Image (cartoon, grey):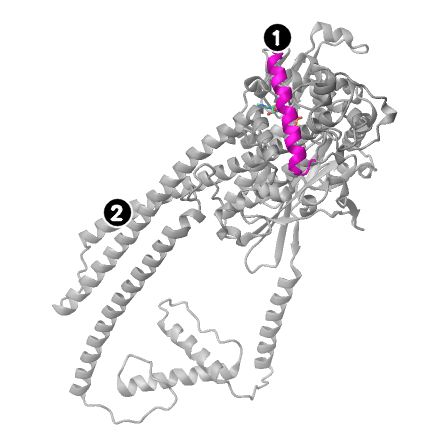
Amino acid sequence: MVKQTIQIFARVKPTVRKQPQGIYSIDEDEKLASSLEIILPRDLADGFVNNKRESYRFKFQRIFDQDAKQETIFENIAKPVAESVLAGYNGTIFAYGQTGSGKTFTITGGAERYSDRGIIPRTLSYIFEQLQKDSSKIYTTHISYLEIYNECGYDLLDPRHEASSLEDLPKVTVLEDPDQNIHLKNLSLHQATTEEEALNLLFLGDTNRMIAETPMNQASTRSHCIFTIHLSSKEPGSATVRHAKLHLVDLAGSERVAKTGVGGQLLTEAKYINLSLHYLEQVIIALAEKHRAHIPYRNSMMTSVLRDSLGGNCMTTMIATLSVEKRNIDESISTCRFAQRVALIKNEAVLNEEIDPRLMIMRLQKEIQELKDELAIVTGERRTEVLTEAELLQLEKLIASFLEDQDPESKLEVGADMRKIHHCFHYLKNLLNDQKIHGMSRASSKVKGQDCREPLKEEEYKKLRDILQQRDNEINILVNMLKKEKKKAQDALHFSSMDRGELRRSWGSPFPPGNPDSPRTLPPSAPTQATQDSCPSQYRSGWLHRKTGMREEMSLGRQEAFEIFKRDHADSVTIEDNKQMLKQRFSEAKALGESINEARRKIGRLKEEITQRHVQQVALGISENIPVPSMPDLLEEKLRSQLEEEKRSYKTMFTRLKALKVEIEHLQLLMDKAKVKLQKEFEAWWAEEATSLQVTSPAVNSLNHLKPFPQTPEAQRERPQLLSNKSDVYTRKILPSPSPLLPSWEQSGPSNPPEDSIPERPVSSVPLTGDSQTDSDILAFIKARQSILQRTGSNDRPPSIAAARTEDR
Ligand code: ADP
Ligand code: MG
């Protein structure tokens, strides 16, 4: 058992603008812990009614300042937890902090660069690497991905995501067994046999989460996400299985409801979040109190799910993410306060071992049989039935291998069966007699059906023995030659199959013919489809689309509009960057794949040369009747050292290629995700445009309303406002089809029909599903508006990309 308090770490998010000096400072001097001092600026301190203090000091295990790399975070925070999970203990890492402070960046990673990948992908990589290294145990890995939103649990890996929206899926519910163990109903577990499979699951879950998110339900800041790696291990032959779980938790934003200043539906959600984190806080306070009997885990779903992680059988680590901009200082202080309370909680992690009943039964059955046999011998009970032919054959094989075995410790194990023991003695006796009679060393003649020929004469026997020796040598040479031929044939087969397909299948030759622009060769290794390793390279393309149910086909008008939208979107630069990076990695992988093949061929050739050298020497020995030289053969030694050298370089290249493979896979998933996001945003924008086209409202007449999709930082900051106003859109009155052709404001000038004269139609029923006539109309509308914007010199041009990328939310 390992007793440990929850470890707390702090990470300060980089600020965009330079902050005034002295707003916070980190003191790393102390031996066991670092301390963070937050100095409240005067103007802010004045606003605090009950609190006149100006500086606050908090202790953490370690504090990571703005420049800390993802790699450092993984090495220092996640790796020790992953190690204890590999040893069989439960582990949890959770990130806590206000929205925008870097929780998702820390737990999952940034969407742009490979080096930005966060704790989850790095931990998966580490765990699978360790599993591969350790051949002493059999490991099984499963993944689950749960989202808790408004106190309801959703399975982010539910395959039904394709067909339904999050709300329509069966909710994940918490069940408790009589031993107070928590079980989650409707949460699927997916086996992942490789790192890629696990990564695919992570991206699938993230994409499902992104798709389910609507302006009304900003799930990413208001929900908790729990990515869990379930690991079981067992030693071969043992009936004891170890289970360990690693929860990687991205909590909802911890900002207080009073500060968010939202109303209506959003308020309800904010309250819920507050409730959920509030219950977490209550549990933590209760745990920190000594002698407290009741811990209110059951109050919320999140605390029920994380019950073991808080004061239970788990090694838990918290990362407090801090944003040190002036306006965020009070939230940062409350995050640190929360962390200080968390640090008081003691957990007791134990190894979770259980007996696998199936294996136990098998072991007991074997034991019973052995005991029965022994008993039969002791009590003298005899088995009378004769041994079958198969049993006799089996015994003879056992004797043969026993006699051949050079190990003096080797045993002839036939079980506690007197019939078998007797048969063995009998057989050996016959062999011995046979040798005595014929003086021969070979014991291959059958015991049964012994012929009783006359003993041979001495010289006749000698002659025969010489001939036999000669034949033996010939046979050996022939067998060697045969082996060589067989190997050649195998190699030829192997290489030709490699040339044809293996490279492409196994990421050596990255560009599938005819499509150099979209290199898609990595097999997706989808969770439930381990056999898809050999499926066509296009498989991955659109994998996320299909898995997440996004539409791929569009009418021509929409495609054109999509191109415009894509060109102007802030993410297009990221996608382009990643594409270039991917291309470069692919060429590297391709070159490496070729060098590896070359090395493999060289190794094959060297092995062949060595074998040939052997055969030559034996042949020489036979023909000239000289014994095989005991002196080391210089040529052979040289060949061997070359072989070793080649093997070493092969191994180095192979390791590099493996790392490249993971990187390529990751980049592709990032791109897929970005594309899905782009398409989703396009759909929303398109719907808005369609509404503008069809709605006759005063707003349509104003040029201010004529905005392309807002992408500039300012526009994005405005966006929540825009989006929360979207409820207006829902209640807006929409003109009935068919009349929507070109915008009425262009043709007939301002018009503002009385609202009650227009029949109501919800926005979702605007035809957007590939009706090409309507789509062309919308496109014409968008183009007309864009040209007006250009004519009027409006600088509402879409995204100022560089600004959008460094934007500080
Ligand atoms: P949260 O999940 O807490 O709401 P995010 O992780 O989404 O916050 O971070 C908000 C923004 O800040 C994102 O664009 C993210 O890429 C960026 N960001 C957060 N932490 C860092 C960091 N350590 N380095 C660089 N960018 C960061
Ligand atoms: Mg987040």
Identify the mark at residue 487; answer none if there is no mark. none
Residue 596 locus on image (x, y percent): 35, 45
Q: Is residue 785 magenta?
A: yes
Q: Write down the residue under mark 1.
A: 20
Most common SS among magenta residues? helix
Residue 763 locus on image (x, y percent): 76, 32
- Count of all numbered marks drawn on residues in the image: 2
Residue in the image at 77% along x and 8% along y = 47
Quadrant in the picture for residue 269: top right
Amino acid type, mark 1: Pro
Residue 389 in view (yes/no): yes
Q: Dot 2 lies on which element? A: helix
Q: Farthest residue in the front direction?
A: 748
Q: How many angstroms separate mark 2 from mark 1 (CA)? A: 63 Å
Q: Dot 1 lies on which element? A: loop
Quadrant in the picture for residue 434: bottom left
Residue in the image at 60% along x and 39% along y = 203
Q: Quadrant of the N terminus?
A: top right
Q: Write down the residue under mark 2.
A: 642
Residue 299 locus on image (x, y percent): 82, 36
In the image, the segment drawn in magenta is 768-794
Q: Nearer the viewer, residue 591 or 731?
A: 731
Q: Is residue 758 magenta?
A: no
Q: Nearer the viewer, residue 549 or 301?
A: 549
